[in-house]
Image: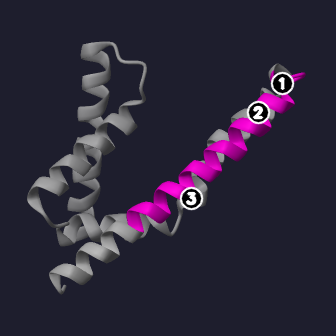
């Protein structure tokens, strides 16, 4: 039952993000807006509930399946990228580098913060 409540929380934040996207006509995915709202909520509360943690662990184990539709979509629209290989390669490399760098800096900050607070 705990995992079900966690999925419900995730779904509510997703629907909230979709509502914000539709209401303010934003060019951002509702899922991204929902995740930003959930992140802010978790930062304010200061902890992740057991329900949400349980559902998140289950989703992380199937993360590859969540990414697959995007990969398949790119496969079927590959002809639209013809002649754009340099821009696509640069975007992939720069995006990957920035993602890894951001993760590194965030982890350093969190480790430093937890070491100072003694947690």
Q: Quadrant of residue 47?
A: bottom left
* Outermost residue toward the left in this view: 45
Q: Are marks 1 and 3 in contact (CB under 8 Å)?
A: no
Q: Quadrant of the N terminus?
A: bottom left
The secondary structure type at the circle numbered 1 is: loop
Above or below: residue 111 compared with residue 70: below
Quick check: marks 3 and 2 in contact, CB under 8 Å? Answer: no
Quadrant of the image occupied by residue 105: bottom left
**Which of labels 3 and 2 is toward the front?**
3
Image position, residue 82 (x, y; %): 88, 23
Q: Is residue 97 highlighted in magenta?
A: yes
Residue count near mark 2 (Cα–Cα under 10 Å), binned few <14, some 14–19, many ≥20: few
Q: How far across and how far down the image is residue 53, in percent?
A: 28, 69
Identify the magenta region: 81-107
* Front residue of this view, candidates 112 and 85: 112
Q: Which residue is mark 3?
A: 100
Label at residue 88? 2
Instruction: In the rendered view, tell whether residue 119 sits above or below residue 13.
Output: below
Going by the picture, which residue comes out furthest to the right?
Answer: 83
Vertical order, 58 against 83 (above or below): below
Instruction: Assign the magenta stretch its main secondary structure.
Output: helix
Q: Is residue 89 left or right of residue 110?
A: right
């Amino acid at each position: 039952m705990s995992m079900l409540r966690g999925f419900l929380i995730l779904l509510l934040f997703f629907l909230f993000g979709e509502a914000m996207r539709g209401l303010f006509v934003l060019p951002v995915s509702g899922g991204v807006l929902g995740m930003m709202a959930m992140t802010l909520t978790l930062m304010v509360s200061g902890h992740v509930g057991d329900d949400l943690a349980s559902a998140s662990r289950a989703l992380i184990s199937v993360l590859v399946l969540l990414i697959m539709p995007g990969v398949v979509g790119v496969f079927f629209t590959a002809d639209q990228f013809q002649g754009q290989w340099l821009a696509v390669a640069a975007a992939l490399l720069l995006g990957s580098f920035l993602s890894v760098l951001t993760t590194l800096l965030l982890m350093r900050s969190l480790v430093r913060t937890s070491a100072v607070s003694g947690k």
